[in-house]
Image (tube, rainbow, N blue to C red):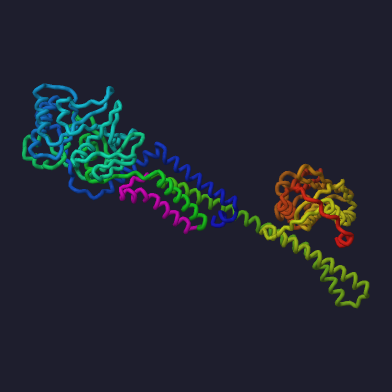
């Protein structure tokens, strides 16, 4: 894999595409409802295990519990219990009293008058209100006129699991907005107004991170890990001296008895708690300024992109155990991001970085494995082909080397006449040239494969080039009594390397003659269609099947017709032809059927350039 992404543009694009797909699948899956639920579980786990420095709470819960109902005669005596409790704490005095008991309906006059008097004696009472179908359910005017503020008492519960992790700081009904009971208690005790902005609330310099969203302004409650300070109303009435503990405190009064508390909710710790404690915990979050800020979508996406990129780089430049070691470190780091963020009071979702890390690492590792396996198979296949090529070349080189060696020995050992010496010298010269051409062919293959062969850019006429190649191949065709027929070659001008193109045409012609039976015909014809020229060489040989046509331009591939004809070759000629034509912006086409011969066609672009001048007589003689 360390070679593949850098080895070719297609491999690099495929690798990047795989990582991008892993990134998109992971991020989209993380933002589904299932992913949100996983993040909620992770949030609760972090909440239970990562505490934060806490100071002494400023709020206290005055609990109307089962014992209070038992002493006063049950739930129907709730308002009497409330009046007695308020009367007991008034002398302390508390800094503020937030009541989580609705006072929207009238009851016995004597009891309501007692409640009203108790409210009047308090320092900063905050009364509750709730949303009903008709609008806001406010306290009776006789009670409301003593309140410093009205606050709604709705605790937001997650619809998927029923856990109350946050509260809405505002609620709107019939165009009228009310702040949360905890927020109003905080505002009253600080004696500062609430200054709004789209991203937060400012209360006397305390910035509350509560951006306005589709569900309003939500505040994550930083529940205390220790037991919240609570005083039982029954104990307070039995021992009035307990009221001294409430001096300077913000008291939240509400029902905690299981038989009467309709707003019991479950917190991140998994324990059920009454609504009044939720409001007290929310107030304490504000008072201690221990705010949990959600990570922005941009930071989440950026972290996921970095993780996917890191996974890609690891397997692009490393392999073996170092790659897997760094991948393991990356995955551990992805799991640690939410933990480290939570320590800094930032809620970073767990599933996006973890899912991106897993998918990217697995995808990149799988890509490396399969690419490496493919490269190994290719290397093994190339090794076998090179071995075959060496065998073929050795076999083919043996003939010219034997001729050269034999001729040179005869010349050195015997006293030959001039004619015989000239004949042997001619043989040595021709065979050495044949050997040089063979070596040059292999060098051309390597140069084309490595992209080191520079193509000349010169105009030449395809018709003249074809006729010159036909003249060169006629002696070979005459020995097998094969007729080479040229049907009116198209006289079009091409732009490129004439020598290489001549090699390609000559190779097609020699192959057609070499693999055709004696006393047959090889036909050369061409045609021009628009900006393309098609030059075809058709023989009457044994033809090829579909499998052979598929592999015909592979290096060192030898067809059945080569084996049956007895011709020994290197199997690289057609590979060079295909590369030459491709380098000129063209393509090769092959049509063949077993027993019906083969037709090789060059399809070349024919630019609008003037035809090159006709070669002089001296040039023709030289060629």
Foreground of the two, 445 or 147: 147
- Considering only vertical position in the picture, is 265 above or below 108? below
- Looking at the image, residue 288 sits to the left or right of residue 311; the answer is left
Q: Main secondary structure of the magenta part?
A: helix
Give the left or right position of residue 323, taking residue 74 as reference.
right
* Membership of 464 in magenta stretch: no
**Residue drawn at point x = 40 percent, y = 43 percent:** 297
Indicate yes or no whether the magenta region holds residue 336: yes
In the depicted structure, whether residue 210 falls above or below residue 421: above
Percent x, y of residue 560 = 76, 50
Q: What is the x, y in percent for residue 76?
A: 14, 24
Q: Position of residue 46 (x, y in %)?
A: 31, 46
Q: Residue at x 26, y 27 (%)?
A: 131
Residue 295 occupies which quadrant of the picture?
A: top left
Residue 538 position within the rendered picture, expressed as x and y whole percent measured from the top left: 82, 46
Q: Identify which residue, 264 or 569, lies in the foreground.
A: 264
Q: Is residue 514 visible?
A: no
Query: Which is more toward the observer, 388 or 498?
Result: 498
Over which residues does the magenta segment extend? 320-349
């Amino acid at each position: 894999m360390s070679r593949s992404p850098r080895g070719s543009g297609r491999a690099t694009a495929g690798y990047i595409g795989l990582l991008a797909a892993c990134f998109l699948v992971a991020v989209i899956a993380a933002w589904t409802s299932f992913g949100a639920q996983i993040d909620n579980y992770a949030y609760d786990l972090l909440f239970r295990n990562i505490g934060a420095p806490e100071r002494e709470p400023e709020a206290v819960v005055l609990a109307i519990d089962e014992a209070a109902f038992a002493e006063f005669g049950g739930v129907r005596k709730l308002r009497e219990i409330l009046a007695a409790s308020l009367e007991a704490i008034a002398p302390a005095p508390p800094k503020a009293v937030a009541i989580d008991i609705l006072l929207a309906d009238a009851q016995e006059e004597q009891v309501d008058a007692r409640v009203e008097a108790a409210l009047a004696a308090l320092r900063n009472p905050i009364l509750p209100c709730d949303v009903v179908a008709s609008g806001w359910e406010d306290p009776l005017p006789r009670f409301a006129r003593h309140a410093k503020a009205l606050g709604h008492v709705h605790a937001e519960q997650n619809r998927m699991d029923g856990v109350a992790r946050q509260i809405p700081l505002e609620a709107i009904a019939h165009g009228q907005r009310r702040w949360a009971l905890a927020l109003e208690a905080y505002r009253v005790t600080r004696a500062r107004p609430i200054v709004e902005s789209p991203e937060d609330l400012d209360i006397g310099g305390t910035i509350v991170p509560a951006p306005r969203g589709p569900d309003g302004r939500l505040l994550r409650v930083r529940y205390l890990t220790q037991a919240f300070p609570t005083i039982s109303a029954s104990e307070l009435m039995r021992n009035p001296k307990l009221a001294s503990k409430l001096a300077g405190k913000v008291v939240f009064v509400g029902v905690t008895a299981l038989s009467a508390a309709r707003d019991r909710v479950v917190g991140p710790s998994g324990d059920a708690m009454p609504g009044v404690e939720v409001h007290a915990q929310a107030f304490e979050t504000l008072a201690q300024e221990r705010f949990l800020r959600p990570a922005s979508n941009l930071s989440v996406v950026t972290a996921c992109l970095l993780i996917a990129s890191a996974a890609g780089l690891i397997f692009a430049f490393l392999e073996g155990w170092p790659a897997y070691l760094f991948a393991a470190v990356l995955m551990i780091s992805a799991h640690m991001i939410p933990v480290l963020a939570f320590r800094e009071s930032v809620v970073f979702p767990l599933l996006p970085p973890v899912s991106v890390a897993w998918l990217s690492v697995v995808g990149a590792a799988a890509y490396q494995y399969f690419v490496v396996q493919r490269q190994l198979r290719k290397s093994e296949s190339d090794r076998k082909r090179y071995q075959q090529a060496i065998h073929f070349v050795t076999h083919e080189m043996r003939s010219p080397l034997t001729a050269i060696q034999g001729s040179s020995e005869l010349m050195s050992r015997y006293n030959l006449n001039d004619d015989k010496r000239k004949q042997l010298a001619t043989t040595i010269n021709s065979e050495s040239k044949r050997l040089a051409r063979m070596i040059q062919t292999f060098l051309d293959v390597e140069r084309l494969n490595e992209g080191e062969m520079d193509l000349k850019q010169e105009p030449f006429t395809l018709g003249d080039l074809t006729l010159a190649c036909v003249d060169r191949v006629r002696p070979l065709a005459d020995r097998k009594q094969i007729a080479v027929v040229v049907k009116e070659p198209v006289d079009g001008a091409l732009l490129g390397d004439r020598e290489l193109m001549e090699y390609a045409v000559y190779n097609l012609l020699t192959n057609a003659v070499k693999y055709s039976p004696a006393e047959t015909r090889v036909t050369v014809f061409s045609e021009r269609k628009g900006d393309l020229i098609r030059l075809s060489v058709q023989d009457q040989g044994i033809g090829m099947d579909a499998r052979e046509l598929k592999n015909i331009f592979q290096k060192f591939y030898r067809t059945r017709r080569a084996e049956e004809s007895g011709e020994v070759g290197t199997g690289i000629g057609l590979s060079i032809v295909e590369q030459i034509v491709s380098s000129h912006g063209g393509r090769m086409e092959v049509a063949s059927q077993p027993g019906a011969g083969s037709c090789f066609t060059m399809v070349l672009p024919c630019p609008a350039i003037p035809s090159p001048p006709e070669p002089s007589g001296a040039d023709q003689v030289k060629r």
